[in-house]
Amino acid sequence: MCNTIVGFATGPCVVTTMSADTAPTALGGSVSSGTYQLTASTFYGMLPDGGASSDGDFGTHRETFLVYVQSATSFNLDQFRADGVQNDSDQGTVTISGTNLTYTQVCPAPGDAGSNGGSAGYTATSSSFTLMMPKNGGILVKVYTKTS
């Protein structure tokens, strides 16, 4: 956990559902500062046998995003996740290019148990934020609803 940020995951416990439909298309949009709770998670595609057991994104969990917009093309992000008795937090910066976001994790640093970040498609509205992430041969779509 990063000791430079304060908070925890709140909101509903969300289970990832599976869909054989075509994943939604990223539309981009204007990101606004605020608190966002994970409210839906859908995987579009077929998981290989045992795929769900090795990835926490496919289990029941809570996520909270704290978004701090810096400009039209960047924002800071604090992320909190609760999965069973495991609580994690990380912090980073996000750059926007068209309908894509690139996350660069700052805390914990990549060399200190942190991730190297990554890219995803996104759609933002005044009340929600949706990520479209390539994963395990499919697309994982996570919807975050703005609460404040």
Image (cartoon, rainbow, N blue to C red):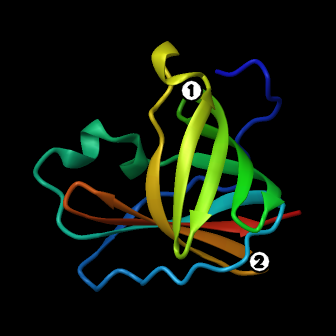
Kind of residue sitting beneath label 2: Ser
Q: Which residue is drawn at 81% across and 58% down?
A: 69
Disc 2: which residue: 127
Tell me the tag on residue 147.
none
Q: Quadrant of the C terminus?
A: bottom right
Q: Which residue is drawn at 40% across and 41% down?
A: 56
Q: Is residue 6 left or right of residue 65?
A: right
Q: Which of 110 and 131 is in front in this view?
A: 110
Query: CB under 8 Å between callouts 2 and 1?
Result: no
Q: In which quarter of the image is the N terminus?
A: top right
Q: Nearer the viewer, residue 120 or 79?
A: 120
Q: Earlier in the sequence, mark 2 or mark 1?
A: 1
Vertical comparison of 137 with 2: above or below? below
Kind of residue sitting beneath label 1: Val
CA–CA distance in space, label 2 to label 1:
29 Å
Query: What secondary structure is marked by label 1?
Result: loop
Q: Residue at x 60, y 48 (%)?
A: 62
Location of residue 101 by image quarter: bottom right
Q: Which residue is drawn at 70% across and 57% down?
A: 74
Residue 29 percent across, percent down from the top left: 66, 80
Vertical comparison of 142 with 7: above or below? below
Residue 138 percent across, percent down from the top left: 25, 65
Q: Is residue 26 left or right of residue 43?
A: right
Vertical comparison of 27 with 57: above or below? below
**Name of the residue lying farthest toward the top:** 112
Q: Which of 17 and 77 is in front in this view?
A: 77
Disc 1: which residue: 85
How crowded is the residue under tag 1: few (<14 C-alpha within 10 Å), some, or many (20+)?
few
How crowded is the residue under tag 2: few (<14 C-alpha within 10 Å), some, or many (20+)?
some
Between tags 2 and 1, which lies in front?
A: 2
Location of residue 128 by image quarter: bottom right
